[in-house]
Image (spheres, rainbow, N blue to C red):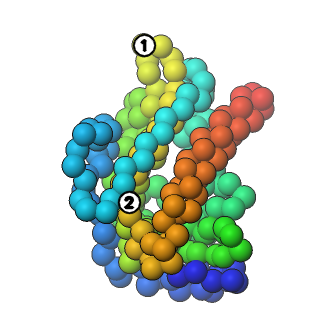
Amino acid sequence: MFSFNRPTKVIVERQIAQAGNLPSSSLKILSPGSSIDPALRLPFGFAYDHSRSRLGQGEAVFQAAKQAFGRWANFDLGWVRVANPQARIAPGQIVAVEVHSLGLWTLNLSRITATIDTRNHFGFIYATTAMHVEQGDERFLLEFDPATGDVWYELEAVSRPRDALARLGYPVACAFQHKFARDSHRRVREEVIAKRLQT
């Protein structure tokens, strides 16, 4: 799964087609409606990661954050990107996440298993396929609190390394997972600020 060369468009399209025929490895632990209980006993070898940040206040901020999600800006981090940005946030959609770290490239294929689209919440859950260096589920959620006007971005993941190299470098893999969360929160905030400056 690791390569010294960036995946070409042909390789990306081929792997997306292959992943479409693979089952997802969903643990069915993450819920569209609420975060899991931190005291929940996870399956052996799995770790729980959770982060939450305030994006701003008001309906306009919430709408701007939703638009950022639709453009996959939460993955547009310089060292990470969605390689099929035309993908829709819809159940069954394969999402190809390209990662470049420590001189190596990976293309990680996941399937959206649930979406959240209500008056005050927007987001999705995806589960990895066998064509991913990790095994598990991740939830990306925007929340608008009508009582305070605050808009929040929450990331929640339950995962463990699947690939042998990822298992060997588990502490490094964990560090990059945390970096992804920090960068994703920052990127969505930047998108919200940029959108507000345009209006």
Q: Amino acid at mark 1?
A: Ala
> Quick one: which residue is furthest to the top in this view?
147
Q: Position of residue 106 (x, y in %)?
A: 58, 75
Res. 147 mark: 1
Q: Nearer the viewer, residue 19 or 104?
A: 104
Tell me the element at label 2. strand
Question: The residue under label 2 is which amino acid type?
Answer: Ser
- Marks 1/2: CA–CA distance: 33 Å
Does 159 sit left or right of 12 as displayed?
A: left
Q: Which residue is mark 2?
A: 159
Query: At 37% across and 44% down in the image, what residue appears?
Result: 116
**Labelled disc at residue 177:** none
Residue 153's spot in the image, x, y percent? 51, 36
Q: Residue at x 56, y 20 (%)?
A: 58
Dot 1 surroundings within 10 Å: few (below 14), some, or many (20 or more)? Answer: few
Which image quadrant is residue 199 in? top right
- Foreground: disc 1 or disc 2: 2
Q: Is residue 125 visible?
A: no
Q: Nearer the viewer, residue 171 or 135?
A: 171
